[in-house]
Image (spheres, rainbow, N blue to C red):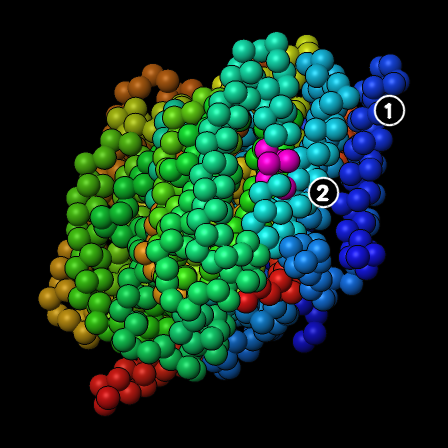
Amino acid sequence: MNFPILTSIILLPSLGALFLLFLKNDFSNDYKSSKYISIFVTFLNFLISLYIWYLFDTSNPDFQFVEEREWLKGFVNYKIGIDGISILFILLTTFITPLCIISVINTTKERLKEFLIAILIMESLMIGAFCSLDLVIFYLFFEGGLIPMFLIIGIWGGARRVYSAFKFFLFTLFGSILMLVAIISIYWLNGTTDIVKLYELSIDSKYQNLLWLAFFSSFAVKTPMWPVHTWLPDAHVEAPTAGSVLLAAILLKMAGYGFIRFSIGLFPVASDFFTPLIYILSLIAIIYTSLVALMQEDMKKLIAYSSVAHMGFVTLGIFTNTTHGLEGSIIQMISHGLVSAALFFCVGVVYDRVHSRIISTYGGLVSMMPKYAVLFMIFTLAAVGLPGTSGFVGEFLILLGTFHDNFLVATIASIGIILAAAYMLWLYKRVIFGKLVNKELLKIKDLKNFELIILIFLAIPTLLFGFYPEPLFNTIESSIKSLLEMYNYNLSLNINN
Amino acid sequence: MMNNLNFVYPEIFISISIMFLLILGVFKKNSSNLIYNLSIITLIGTLVLTFNYPINTDNILFNESYKIDYLSTFMKILVFIGGIFTLIVSFKYLKIFKILQIEYSILILTSILGMMVMISSNDLIVFYIGLELQSLSLYVLASFNRDQIKSSEAGLKYFVLSALSSGLLLYGCSLIYGFSGTTNFDLISDSFDKVEYGLTFGLVFILVGLAFKISAVPFHMWAPDVYEGSPTSVTLFFAIVPKLAALTVFIRFLYVPFINMIEQWQMIIIFLSIASMVFGAIAAIGQTNLKRLVAYSSIGHMGYALAGLSTGTNQGIQSSIIYISIYLVMNLGLFSCLFMLKRNDKYYENIEDLSGLSKNHPLLSLSFLIVLFSLAGIPPLAGFFAKFYIFKIVIEQSMYFLAIVGLLATVISAFYYLRIIKIIYFDKEKEKYDLDYNIGLKISLVLSTLLVAFYFIAPSKLLEIISNIVII
């Protein structure tokens, strides 16, 4: 196919943003049209990406829709393409963004146009990161995402937004800087930064450990793994709802995606060597942050810590290097993208009404907001990983893969699931059930239409993929198979040497 | 002889223009506006004349003391662009401060003439003449707003310290002449087979003098005070143009006569580079005055440019030149923003004055945002590519320590750029600023912002042009 369809889904939101820039920022018709334009652009982008999924050949493990153009002469080519893994993340991005925009245009009063521009640019950068087939291009998109996110947290965030925005920015920048050194080193070692070529060339095992650590420093911050996870609760708590959703649903997935695409793909020997480290850090993340989540009084913080725990499962699954583990991780990431987005929206719903995130403010909401209670229940159960929700499929497969690799690790990780059930159900109990003590809550209204739309849209895939995860498996199957074949082949080469 | 003159038309043209403008200014009353406009035209004319050469060949003129090659032509063009924009963005500023006198534009022209001589010099004496011509003009420019104590202080401080460094530099020149018997760059390199300590001493003295001119740590002490005290238009000039000339001399001086002594000077340059990057990043954090902050940030940026130089390769030189070209554009954008902070004929230059700028001036703030993130080196803006080329070459030479320190300094410096952005975007708004920008200011701001923001579309264009610069 000659039409540069991937470039077009990368550029489309940015063009929309550029268009918005020239609209007047007052309560005239321009103001309304900025809402329609942004919804239109993002929804169109979702449709295009669905169309790409439809065109996508699942039996082919190679990269598809590849576009290559000369960019930095003789050094880096602008090369993008997708395989079964990246298409899912692109879909997730294009699916979540319109929902964010719907939420933003209905809740944000101040500087709406700028917010929409930031989200649109963010979408472009995230899609770009998931499609890029060149390390430098990936870095560009990966790092570029810092700018809009910094502004989203800093301008529209809560009370301690400045501190959180700085922490977010400097932590991630610090992590990524080392990755840049590694990328340039790879260029000088192998003469290219093209991922497809690097897969074939395989990097000298002498250097793999150092390079792996440099990439790890970036992805670990972004995942976030224990002990560099501390920016996440701060950023989440202070970010506006749409910011939290973007952060949890998509930005964190960039790191998981990076682990699969780069750490496993480029440095198999080092990945094998560092697997125990990842296991330990993941287990600490799962157990420790689950315990921390139990003790939170702030709803957003609780969900933020649960994100860290869920991402712990993801890293665990990725580094089992089994088909089950990897598939589980990807499905867990997609599922977490949907569920955590939904949970942050749920918090946003009550926050917009009562302006408090403290759990003890609430209680007994079920009698006032029955629809809300039902939908919140679905997502709570999905976060716990109840069978029939997408959360179950991912966690189950990850544990299956882990048992295959290491019995003890899997046993400890299973405790995390029990803890997840504890903190999520306890949260649900305290917010929804119980006596309605707070008088303010008597006036609270049930879900508005747009909130209902957002949550139902998120509930559909959560349940659908819980009962019928087949489409996801079909898409990723051959890509993962070829990734693992390459991984094992490289590993055996190294052992023979 | 006539043949030689063919190649220096730009220098001749600008010299004659300077004299003509001076006479015109003396005999015609109230001609400062006219002379200001004529100076811009002179610079544009010189720019056009510079393009007129067969730049593919190296021309060594006047007993091999003057060199017109790709490097000199490119750097001269940058100098002219810097000069032109310095003049056109500051018209209103000069009017309001009542410093738009005939001497102002003429001094800018003379200092540019000095820089042209510096850039093309292939001989220590020619180089020194150029250096002094530009320095003397700059002393006067720094203290141009003579009714203000700060401006006079800036001029005096710059004069005293700069004279000291010129003395050191001259001492270095005499040492080199004493030990090699010549002042010509090409001949110096032929004159020694083994390392001679006399020459090393000479080299070090000259490096000190040059490091002073580009304000590399530890010879940076003058920069913050001079930047703060001088009129903002002169600060802009200081921040970009003399650095271009000094960097060219750095390149010529290190890579032509002393390339064989790379072991001797490489450590010095690496030290200057690391010290500048780290110090520039840390010292800028506590600043409250934007011009002072720019001074520290430019110290840091010079550190990165020197990192490219320290590699001792052609690609290193090219990466430094790319860096300084992009740095020129970014600083132009930053200062254009500063010139827009005017309310009732008063210019504001404290960081606090930017508070909440984004509410009242969204587009100006957006330009600020783009330029600042670019200065911090965040992709996909131009500043990232500038740093990227530098680190690409530094890592190729396996200078990992320099690369990692440099990148960490980037993270630290990101902090103070973020602080400005925070004040612009997150803080409470203040009164509106005036909106009566003149056209030159608008053009310069829009151009530089667009260049910085969309550099990523065709990043190899600049690279292609600069890859013709081959010194060794």
Q: Is B427 drawn above or below residue A284 in the view shown?
A: above
Query: Are labels 2 and 1 assigned to the same chain?
Result: yes
Nearest the camera: A233 or B126?
B126
The three-letter code of the residue at mark 2 reads: Phe
Q: Which residue is mark 2?
A: B80
Q: Is residue B135 above or below residue A138?
A: above
Sequence-earlier tag: 2 or 1: 1
Q: Position of residue B121 (x, y in %)?
A: 63, 51
Viewer-nearest of discs 2 and 1: 1
Residue nearest the viewer, comparing A91 with B300: B300
**Gap between marks 2 and 1 measured at Cα:** 22 Å
Report which residue position mark 1 lands on: B24
Q: Quadrant of residue B333?
A: top right
Q: Is residue B109 above or below residue A255?
A: above
The 10 Å Cα crowd at callout 1, few under 14, some 14 to 19, many 20 or more, is some
- Give the residue at x 45% y 70%: A187
Q: Chain of mark 2?
A: B
Farthest residue in the right direction?
A: B28
Vertical relation: B363 (above or below) A303: above
Q: Which chain does the numbered disc 1 sit on?
A: B
Q: Which residues are magenta?
A: B130-135
Residue A231 belongs to magenta span: no
The kind of residue on which mark 1 rests is Leu
Along the line of sight, the residue nearer the viewer: A371 or B119? B119
